[in-house]
């Protein structure tokens, strides 16, 4: 493994060039959406800082460009990608920075397989650009990226540890995630990268439920060496169900003692005008760079990492 | 009470009535899931380790511990006698509790003693100590290479790898974190 340039500046340049070249080949439009948004969305477990002093109406730093990029899809753009900065509060560690780089792309084809193919190709090409081979090394172990990646359902991963994923998802969310971070995630993607599919419907986020099996949603995550790289969905386009999910997530935030976020009415209005069937993926670029450089900490490949932040405490 | 945002290396907490210190921790959070802090602890009394994953915001009970600067006075049979340098109180520590620390202490050495529920549970020597060599084989003449070491026994019984030019009676600076030779002390 080559030594990493200070802050990973050179490696990042090569990664971004590789990504842009891929999307150019695929006839994508590179777009740019605001960091300041009227609502950060309503993910139950994503904390967003509000920005004061800019406008009379409330503004937040976007935790992802998702809501705005989907509005572009409703305006007729068919294949779009963005290399965005995203901000999430209370997330800092060896794999988390409060401000991070996110690659997000959408196609107006409601197909998870195409998204997975994009993901595999982007990771392979980036590794080739940075390491000269379709291989990454982590903790002294070499992980081949060529050859077919492993595909695992959530149900089968939990069954290995004697759990029924659907029962846990329904009745004990904390245990669901505790089992995930303790026993499942650290082992994912070591022999070869792993795509984790068929997430239980309660964790659909903004993915559509599978039309044939409504217990699961059309969502996948990719793992290499225990590192989560992305979250991809076949997108929920139904405004009624979307508004309902926002409302439920808000109520859940309140139950957990967190402050609720407003529902993004511009986004719901755009869905009502009609969003084409689509799929989209969000991939953490700093983590991809970690993998392809062998950096043990995300801060090693960020030119200006934040100093250790004391987490915000909910009032 | 502490919560997960207080977790850092060296934090001392109680589990099941036993005191532990944090040796490693990692923030973990699935993109769409709850945040946790994966934490590795060491039992302050037995030295055994324990891994726990805490949900963000979960509470941890602080261990009732206190660190005091003390001086090692002397050893009497199975007991090591320490004195608090500010109150002159004396404390007895059983030999089996001394672990590796016993190899670093000579009469008068300043140490930090960790008390849990008023009882001494851990003796921390200074980072560097100076100890005299009581036995070592003669080195090869003229061999100044520092990459080769030979065994030497210190006045405390501690065995240290030292450069070939070291002789009996010389005083050496030892790093107590690694147990390694640092340099010869000119006296």
Image (spheres, coloured by chain):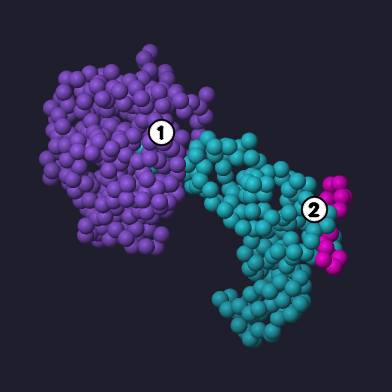
Chain colours: A purple, B cyan
Subunit of mark 1?
Answer: A
Question: What residue lies at 72% left-to-right and 55% top-to-bottom?
Answer: B122
In this rendering, would A87 be left or right of A33?
right
Tell me how far mark 1 sits from mark 2, CA to CA. Answer: 48 Å
- At label 2, counting other C-alpha atoms closer than 10 Å, the crowd grade (few under 14, some 14-19, many 20 or more) is many
As drawn, B152 above or below A156 = below
Q: Position of residue A59 (x, y in %)?
A: 37, 21
Question: What residue lies at 31% left-to-right and 33% top-to-bottom?
Answer: A205
Q: Nearer the viewer, residue B132 or B78?
A: B78
Q: Is residue B184 magenta?
A: no
Q: Nearer the viewer, residue B150 or B12?
A: B12
The residue that disc 2 covers is B70
Subunit of mark 2?
Answer: B
Q: In which quadrant of the rendered view does residue A62 lie?
A: top left
In this rendering, would B116 be left or right of A257?
right
Is any atom of residue A88 visible in this view? no
Quarter of the image that includes the C terminus of chain B:
bottom right
- At label 1, counting other C-alpha atoms closer than 10 Å, the crowd grade (few under 14, some 14-19, many 20 or more) is some
Question: Which range of residues does the magenta coloring cover?
Answer: B75-90
The residue that disc 1 covers is A45
Mark in the foreground, 1 or 2: 1
As drawn, A7 above or below A275 = below
Is any atom of residue A119 visible in this view? yes
Q: Nearer the viewer, residue A286 or A118?
A: A118
How many numbered circles are shown?
Answer: 2
SS at badge 2: strand
SS at badge 1: loop
As drawn, B127 above or below A55 = below
Quarter of the image that includes the N terminus of chain B:
top right
């Amino acid at each position: 493994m080559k030594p990493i340039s200070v802050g990973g500046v050179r490696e990042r340049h090569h990664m971004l060039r590789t990504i842009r070249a891929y999307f150019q080949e695929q006839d994508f439009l590179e777009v740019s959406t605001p960091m300041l948004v009227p609502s950060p969305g309503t993910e139950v477990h994503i904390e967003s800082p509000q920005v004061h002093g800019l406008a009379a109406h409330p503004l937040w730093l976007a935790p992802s460009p998702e809501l705005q990029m989907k509005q572009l899809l409703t305006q007729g753009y068919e294949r779009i990608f963005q290399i965005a900065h995203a901000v999430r509060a209370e997330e800092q560690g060896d794999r988390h920075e409060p401000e991070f780089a996110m690659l997000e792309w959408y196609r107006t084809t409601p197909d998870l397989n195409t998204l997975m193919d994009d993901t595999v190709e982007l990771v392979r090409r980036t590794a080739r650009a940075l390491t000269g081979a379709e291989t990454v090394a982590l903790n002294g172990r070499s992980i081949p990226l060529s050859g077919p990646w492993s595909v695992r359902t959530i149900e089968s991963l939990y069954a290995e540890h004697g759990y029924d994923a659907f029962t846990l998802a329904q009745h004990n969310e904390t245990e669901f995630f505790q089992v995930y971070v303790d026993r499942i995630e650290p082992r994912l993607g070591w022999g070869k990268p792993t795509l984790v599919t068929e997430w239980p419907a309660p964790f659909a986020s903004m993915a559509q439920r599978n039309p044939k099996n409504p217990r699961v949603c059309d969502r996948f995550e990719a793992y290499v060496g225990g590192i989560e790289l992305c979250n991809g969905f076949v997108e929920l386009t139904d405004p009624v169900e979307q508004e309902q999910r926002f409302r439920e997530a808000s109520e859940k935030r309140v139950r957990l003692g967190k402050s609720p976020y407003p529902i993004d009415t511009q986004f719901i209005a755009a869905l009502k005008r009609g969003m084409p069937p689509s799929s989209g993926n969000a991939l953490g670029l700093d983590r991809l760079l970690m993998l392809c450089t062998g950096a043990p900490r995300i801060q090693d490949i960020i030119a200006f990492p934040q100093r250790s932040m004391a987490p915000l405490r909910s009032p | 009470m502490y919560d997960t945002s207080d977790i850092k290396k060296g934090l001392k907490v109680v589990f099941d009535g036993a005191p532990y210190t944090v040796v490693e921790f990692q923030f973990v959070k699935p993109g769409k899931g709850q945040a946790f802090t994966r934490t590795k602890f060491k039992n302050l009394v037995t030295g055994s380790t324990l891994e726990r994953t805490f949900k963000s915001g979960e509470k941890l009970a602080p261990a009732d511990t206190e660190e005091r600067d003390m001086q090692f006075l002397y050893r009497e049979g199975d007991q090591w006698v320490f004195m608090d340098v500010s109150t002159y109180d004396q404390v007895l520590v059983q030999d089996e509790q001394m672990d590796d620390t016993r190899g670093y202490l000579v009469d008068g050495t300043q140490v930090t003693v960790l008390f849990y529920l008023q009882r001494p549970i851990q003796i921390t020597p200074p980072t560097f100590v100076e100890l005299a060599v009581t036995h070592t084989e003669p080195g090869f003449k003229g061999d100044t290479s520092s990459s080769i070491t030979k065994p030497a026994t210190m006045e405390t019984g501690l065995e240290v790898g030292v450069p070939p030019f070291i002789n009996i009676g010389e005083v050496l600076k030892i790093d107590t974190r690694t147990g390694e030779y640092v340099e010869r002390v000119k006296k």
